[in-house]
Image (cartoon, rainbow, N blue to C red):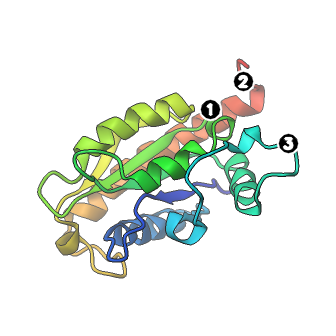
């Protein structure tokens, strides 16, 4: 069975650049035979967190949360695409992630970060790394930062420089390694 790696996008802005990065990594994952559905908060329109998925009585969670829970339970890893807003995580991303907990457990996460400037969103990625660990989906050691995203990727998510596909290959090799290792360990059972 192929790996399942949802790509969780973090921005809901109308002119967001993150779709370029999401399209790029989805295509890279799919070229490896990996199922990579897009989790887009702009399409999901989740309410601000009032209750986590696990806090609803069984069968009473909103359909959008049930659908995400089903996807997350069959996932082998998560790939998070994050902008950097004021040196931090976008609020839509935090809200999207916070609706779940156990569904992330024992699965690695990879962080693709981006910005219009030269830092590529790494300041937000450091905070996101801590958050993903707390959720149970610890991030792999490498990041895939994309500085100057408007020049690095076109609207369709096609790389405009040679460095990006090379960096993505190494990053995704690492994510797949962790995903396969933890998939094998989950099959044996988890500590709790």
**158 or 170: nearer the viewer:** 158
Instruction: Using the numbered discs, state the Cα–Cα distance from disc 1 to disc 2 in whole angstroms.
Output: 8 Å
The answer to whether residue 39 is seen in the rendering is yes
Q: Residues within 10 Å of mark 3 (few under 14, many from 20)?
A: few
Look at mark 1 in the image and give the residue it sits on.
106
Look at mark 2 in the image and give the residue it sits on.
190
Residue 57 numbered mark, or none: 3
Instruction: Check contact, mark 1 vs mark 2: CB within 8 A.
Output: yes
Q: Residues within 10 Å of mark 1 (few under 14, many from 20)?
A: many
Label 1 sits on a secondary structure element that is loop
Mark 3 or 2 closer to N-term? 3
Left or right, residue 188 beside residue 4: right
**110 or 87: nearer the viewer:** 87
At x 34%, y 36%, the residue is: 127
Look at the image and tell me in which quarter the C terminus lies: top right
Look at the image and tell me in which quarter the N terminus lies: bottom right
Which residue is outermost to the top?
A: 191
At x 85%, y 52%, the residue is: 60
Residue 68 is situated, as x and y percent measured from the top left of the image, at: 68, 56
Residue 4 is situated, as x and y percent measured from the top left of the image, at: 63, 55
Mark 1 or 2 closer to N-term? 1
Name the mark nearer the viewer: 3 or 2. Answer: 3
Label 2 sits on a secondary structure element that is loop
């Amino acid at each position: 069975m192929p790996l399942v790696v949802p790509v969780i996008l973090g921005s809901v802005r109308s002119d967001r650049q993150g779709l370029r990065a999401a399209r790029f990594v989805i295509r890279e994952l799919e070229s490896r035979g990996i199922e990579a559905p897009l989790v887009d908060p702009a399409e999901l329109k989740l309410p601000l967190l009032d209750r986590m998925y696990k806090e609803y009585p069984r069968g009473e969670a909103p359909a959008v949360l049930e659908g995400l829970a089903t996807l997350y339970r069959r996932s082998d890893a998560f790939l998070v695409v994050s902008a950097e807003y004021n040196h931090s995580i976008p609020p839509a991303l935090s809200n999207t992630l916070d609706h779940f907990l156990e569904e992330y457990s024992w699965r690695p996460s990879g962080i693709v970060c981006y910005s219009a400037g030269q830092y590529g969103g790494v300041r937000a990625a450091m905070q996101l790394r801590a958050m993903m660990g707390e959720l149970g989906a610890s991030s792999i050691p490498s990041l895939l930062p994309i500085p100057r995203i408007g020049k690095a990727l076109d609207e369709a998510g096609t790389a405009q420089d040679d460095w990006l596909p090379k960096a993505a290959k190494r990053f995704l090799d690492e994510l797949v390694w962790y995903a396969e290792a933890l998939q094998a360990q989950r099959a044996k059972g988890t500590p709790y």
